[in-house]
Image: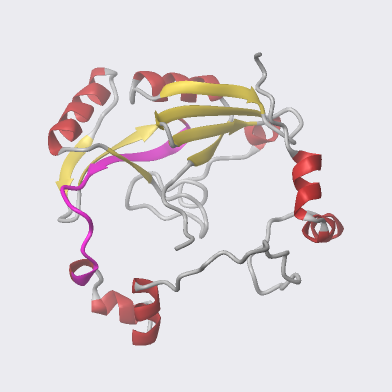
Amino acid sequence: MTAPNGLHHLALSTADIKSQIEYFTDVLGFELVALYWMHGVDGAWHGFLRMNDTCSVAFVQMDAIKSIDRVTGTTHAGNAGGATAGGTMQHVAFNVDTYEDLIAMRSRIRSRGVNVMGPLHHGMCDSIYFAGPEGLVLEVATSSEPIDGRKWIDPEVVALAGISEEDLARYRSPATFDAPAEPLPNPPIDSAKPHLEYPEAVYRTLMAMPDDEVTRRFSESEPPVS
């Protein structure tokens, strides 16, 4: 089945990348593995902090971010129960393998002077909650077994969300997809579908461009240090 198998990186905006690197390395123990001029974005920096060989937290710093206000209830949730605009990050939870690791992580965070709430037992996982720089709402969680959809898909919430029995069956068992022998080209632009935001003419040009040309024109493969 063709589907993503994990989170490669989560990229967060920052007006102070050094403070974020300091926090995520010292408080959480992530390793800085990349910090370079962001490809294709003039004046922007891109930093990667490693969790494991296939998963990182990334930060993007550019001058424009400094003039954008952080507003609790709009851009930031403030806490794990707060609201933000649709499509924004409400909170992010990092994994540890065991409950003992969770308690040890709580001690690590507190040893750096950061307040932590929890653990809270959620049935499917155990979690602790705390804040990061620039208003980030953070969680560390652990699960002793995979989430069982038979127990954790609430029929009441399903109905309130407007999900039919047919919808639920599709969501529980997504359609498989076998990659064709030849890669598919972009479909015609449909305004009802989600789209990246570019000037319309630029977007149409990019979406009409052959994939090989996009790769050739916009890739930057060489590391900054040889």
- Image position, residue 3 (x, y; %): 47, 59
Left or right: residue 48 versus residue 195 is: left
Residue in the picture at 72% in, 70% down: 187
| Quarter of the image where one finds residue 155 | bottom left
Residue 108 vs 136, above or below: the answer is above
The colour scheme is secondary structure
Magenta stretch bounds: 134-150
List the single residue furthest toward the front. 181
Front-most of 55 and 215?
215
| Quarter of the image where one finds residue 132 | top left
**Count of numbered labels shown in the rendering:** 0
In the rendered structure, does residue 113 fall within the stretch colored magenta?
Answer: no
Front-most of 216 and 31?
216
Residue 179 vs 166, above or below: the answer is above
In the rendered structure, does residue 135 fall within the stretch colored magenta?
Answer: yes
- Image position, residue 117 (x, y; %): 21, 37
Left or right: residue 136 versus residue 209 is: left
Front-most of 206 and 213?
213
- Image position, residue 8 (x, y; %): 48, 42
Residue 123 vs 194, above or below: the answer is above
Residue in the picture at 17% in, 53% down: 122
Residue in the picture at 51% in, 28% down: 48
Front-most of 32 and 53?
53
Residue 72 vs 111, above or below: the answer is below
Say which quadrant the N terminus sits in. Answer: bottom left
Residue in the picture at 69% in, 35% down: 64
Say which quadrant the C terminus sits in. Answer: top right
